[in-house]
Image (cartoon, rainbow, N blue to C red):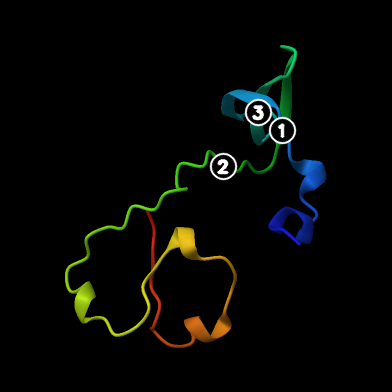
Amino acid sequence: MDYAERFSLGPHIRLNSDVRQVSRSDDQHRWEVVVAYKGGEEVVEYFHKVVLSTGINDVPCMPSVEGIVKFKGTVLHSNAYKRYFFSIFITPRAPLLPT
């Protein structure tokens, strides 16, 4: 089971579309998103939340962190974080390094 299936996200995902503009709508108090669908039709839709998922973090870029070689635990890039393991977070053993 993949992430989208697990959390029933499929009906909320728009494929084969281009986001042309994302802006905050003052009168709607939501995000105004202009989407161009396959075939060229442009539609304005409103959302309470917007997720940008461009794939830019597909190849991790590990930052240089002074003293990291002295760290005895596991170091993870956020790209490698796939599921929540409670035991990781009850001790300071696995810092996540964002891009």
Q: Is residue 88 left or right of residue 16?
A: left
**Mark 1 or 3, closer to the camera:** 1
Residue 90 in the image, given as x and y percentages of width and height:
49, 87
Q: Is residue 28 left or right of residue 82?
A: right
Residue named by callout 2: 53
Taking 67 as reference, is 63 above or below it?
Answer: above
Residue 53 picture quarter: top right
Of marks 1 and 2, which one's residue comes earlier in the chain? 1
Taking 51 as reference, is 70 above or below it?
Answer: below
Give the CA separation, mark 2 to mark 3.
Answer: 17 Å
Q: Amino acid at mark 2?
A: Ser
The residue shown at (57%, 65%) is 82
The residue shown at (53%, 38%) is 54
Considering depth in this image, is 92 or 60 the residue closer to the camera? Answer: 60
Of marks 2 and 3, which one's residue comes earlier in the chain? 3
Within 10 Å of the Cα at label 2, are there few (<14), some (14-19), or many (20+) other Cα atoms?
A: few
Of marks 1 and 3, which one's residue comes earlier in the chain? 1
Mark 3 lies on a secondary structure that is strand
Within 10 Å of the Cα at label 1, are there few (<14), some (14-19), or many (20+) other Cα atoms?
A: few
The label on residue 15 is: 1
Give the CA separation, mark 1 to mark 2.
Answer: 12 Å
Residue 12 in the image, given as x and y percentages of width and height:
77, 42
The residue shown at (71%, 11%) is 40
The label on residue 32 is: 3
The quarter of the image holding the N terminus is bottom right
Mark 1 lies on a secondary structure that is loop
The residue shown at (65%, 27%) is 33
Q: Amino acid at mark 1?
A: Leu
